[in-house]
Image: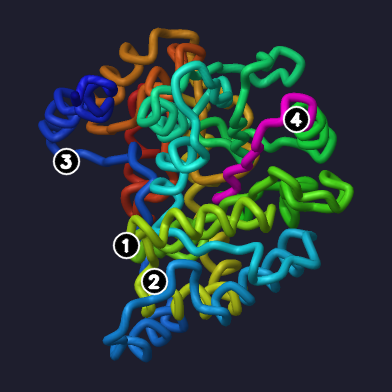
């Protein structure tokens, strides 16, 4: 009954966490992308102001919150023209990812496509409903029985950004297959340099869709840009017919975002100043850790956006995890993100300023 999924992969890090904890100056955790900075006051105040919420929240999300999502897509994601009927608030993005294949009616014989380097929830969702998984980034290789396509740009763990052209190519193939296509975009406000500093292409951008959102969704989480991981605040937007169908199923199953969180979502999306400040904090941490990781012998791959450094020394990832743990540093083995990641390690820049500084010093001092 419970054997559809193997043990949660992060359990395999326990011995290395224990080894890192034995370092004379303690361990530094650069594994989980867990926000550690304060939730902005503008959001806290909105939550506090909605604390008297005795009634049930709406499954769809209150109109004001969904309207704020529409405005945010228009102003920050170059995707104007959305209506609140094309938006669904979700309890974080992971639950939406994990349950979407089942809610779409997928089952045995159906195929879910995921990226070569992939967040584990995409596979989890397929296994929940008994569907199969195809791993691959080239649209021409996606099989005929594909029913759902997951894109992730900016990517976790790699930080790769898909251009408008690549998104269009993926959408064209999805239309040929009659498949639903969803881009997980939760790091889209965190681009590092070049064209991606101010804008990372959105799945709903008219330059991608030509205005046709049939079977197209974008999902977004406020965990990263607004330090709201503890709120479970996220949303999906796109095809109105898909959204309405999902709302109906979620009504039946009682999946709804608490009203105070809905108010917090509206406040977060209406204030870009806190996002810019948080990005500057992450930039400083990245600028400290990145050269130290490189000096230690890692080559950085992609990492154009998001909260991670995707790095390789050409070793088996567990060898690198062992060496890092001996320095009191915990990172993530790339194997957790697919077969292609076996020679990679993921470093997170979400630790505190002090922890990032000390991690960089340990890497540099290890060079002798």
Q: In this view, does 86 lie above or below 116?
A: below
Q: In this view, does 185 lie to the left or right of 79?
A: left
Going 82% across and 36% down the picture, which residue do you hit?
A: 168
**182 in the magenta segment:** yes
Q: Where is residue 239 in the image (x, y as percent from the top left)?
A: 69, 53
Query: Marks 3 and 2, Cα distance to the nearest angstrom?
Result: 29 Å
Q: Position of residue 70 (x, y in %)?
A: 68, 69
Magenta-colored span? 174-186
Q: What element carries label 3?
A: loop
* Camera-side mark, 2 or 4: 4
Q: Earlier in the sequence, mark 4 or mark 3?
A: 3
Q: Which of marks 3 and 2 is nearer the N terminus?
A: 3
Label 3 sits on residue: 25
Query: Marks 1 and 4, Cα distance to the nearest angstrom?
Result: 33 Å
Q: What element carries label 2?
A: loop
Cβ–Cβ below 8 Å for labels 2 and 1? yes
Going 48% across and 50% down the picture, which residue do you hit?
A: 285
Q: Earlier in the sequence, mark 1 or mark 4?
A: 4
Dividing the picture into quarters, in which one does residue 256 lie? bottom left
Label 4 sits on residue: 170
Query: Marks 2 and 4, Cα distance to the nearest angstrom?
Result: 36 Å
| Identity of the residue furthest to the top in this view | 315
């Amino acid at each position: 009954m419970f054997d559809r999924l193997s043990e949660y992969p992060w359990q395999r890090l326990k011995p290395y966490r224990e080894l890192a904890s034995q370092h004379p100056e303690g361990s530094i955790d650069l594994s989980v992308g867990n926000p550690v900075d304060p939730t902005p006051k503008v959001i806290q105040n909105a939550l506090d102001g909605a604390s008297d919420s005795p009634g049930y929240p709406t499954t769809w999300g209150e109109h004001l919150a969904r309207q704020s999502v529409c405005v945010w897509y228009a102003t920050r994601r170059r995707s104007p023209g959305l209506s609140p009927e094309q938006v669904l608030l979700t309890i974080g993005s992971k639950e939406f990812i994990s349950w979407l294949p089942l809610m779409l009616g997928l089952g045995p014989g159906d195929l879910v496509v995921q990226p070569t380097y992939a967040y584990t929830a995409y596979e989890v969702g397929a296994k929940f409903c008994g569907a199969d998984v195809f791993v691959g980034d080239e649209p021409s290789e996606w099989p005929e029985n594909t029913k759902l396509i997951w894109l992730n740009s900016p990517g976790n763990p790699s930080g790769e950004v898909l251009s408008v052209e690549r998104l269009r190519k993926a959408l064209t193939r999805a239309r040929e297959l009659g498949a639903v296509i969803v881009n997980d975009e939760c790091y889209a406000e965190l681009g590092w340099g070049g064209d991606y500093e101010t804008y990372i292409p959105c799945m709903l951008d008219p330059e991608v869709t030509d205005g046709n959102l049939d079977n197209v969704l974008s999902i977004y989480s406020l965990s990263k840009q607004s330090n709201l991981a503890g709120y479970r605040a996220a949303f999906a937007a796109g095809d109105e017919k898909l959204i309405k169908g999902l709302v109906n199923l979620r009504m039946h199953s009682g999946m709804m975002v608490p009203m105070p969180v809905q108010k917090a979502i509206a406040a977060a999306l209406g204030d870009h100043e806190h996002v810019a400040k948080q990005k500057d904090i992450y930039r400083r941490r990245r600028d400290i850790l990145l050269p130290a990781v490189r000096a230690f012998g890692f080559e950085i791959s992609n990492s154009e956006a998001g909260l991670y450094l995707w790095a390789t020394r050409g070793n088996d990832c567990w060898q690198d995890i062992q060496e890092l743990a001996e320095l009191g540093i915990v990172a993530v083995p790339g194997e957790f993100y697919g077969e292609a990641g076996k020679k990679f390690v993921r470093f997170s820049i979400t630790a505190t300023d002090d922890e990032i500084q000390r991690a960089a010093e340990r890497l540099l001092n290890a060079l002798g």
